[in-house]
Amino acid sequence: QVQLVESGGGLVQSGGSLRLSCATSGSIFDFYTMGWYRQAQGNQRELVATVTSAGILTYADSVKGRFTISRDIDKSMVYLQMNSLRPEDTAVYYCNAQTISWPPRDYWGQGTQVTVSS
């Protein structure tokens, strides 16, 4: 059972920065794609960024050039550095771990609120 715990959310002004952290329950990066998703009120959950077991990064078009996903293998941590934040980035952000085996299985953290004021 994979456990994920997010932290680092909060209230920030437009143009500001936040770093989200996701603590994982062990050395899972070889077997999982790690990602950040977000869900704004009234909207569906959407992908923000992922990092594969091979270290390949992907980003949603809306965050490219502003957000950076990274991982610390030694600490079993995943991060999301968010710069140049906009009010439309306001959402609950979730850490995700998806197995690379088939069929894929998803694990989720409890989420952390990010609010960007204009």
Image (cartoon, helix red, strand yellow):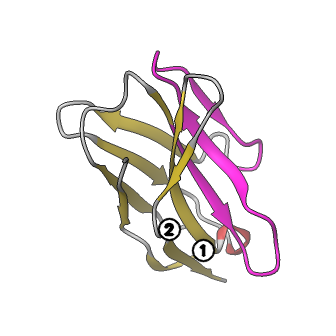
From the viewer's side, name the closer residue of 10 and 55.
55
Q: Secondary structure at mark 2?
A: loop
Q: Which residues are magenta?
A: 34-62
Horizontal and vertical percent for residue 2? Answer: 37, 47
Taking the image as shown, residue 85 lies to the left or right of residue 72, namely: right
Q: Residue at x 57, y 36 (%)?
A: 50
* Amino acid type at image mark 2: Gly
Q: Nearer the viewer, residue 90 or 24?
A: 24
Direction from residue 8 to residue 95 in the image, left or right: right
Name above or below for residue 52 compared with residue 90.
above
Whether the magenta-drawn stretch holds residue 48 is answered as: yes
Instruction: Tell me the crowding category of disc 2: few under 14, some 14 to 19, or many 20 or more residues within 10 angstroms, Cα based.
Output: some
Queried whether the magenta region covers residue 4, the answer comes back as no
Residue 56 image label: none
Q: Is residue 15 above or below residue 41?
A: above
User: Disc 1 vs disc 2: Cβ atoms closer than 8 Å?
Assistant: yes
The total number of labels drawn is 2
Judge left or right: residue 47 versus residue 93.
Answer: right
**Mark 1 vs mark 2, CA separation in Å:** 5 Å
- Taking the spot 58% from the left edge, 40% from the top edge, the residue there is 105
Question: Residue 61 versus residue 31: which sits nearer the camera?
Answer: 31
Residue at x 43% of width, y 72% of height:
9
Mark 1 Cα shell of 10 Å, populated few (<14), some (14-19), many (≥20): some
Q: Which residue is mark 1?
A: 14
Q: Is residue 27 left or right of residue 61?
A: left
Taking the spot 75% from the left edge, 49% from the top edge, the residue there is: 62
Which residue in the protein does label 2 denote? 16
The image shows residue 20 at horizontal and vertical percentages of: 40, 59
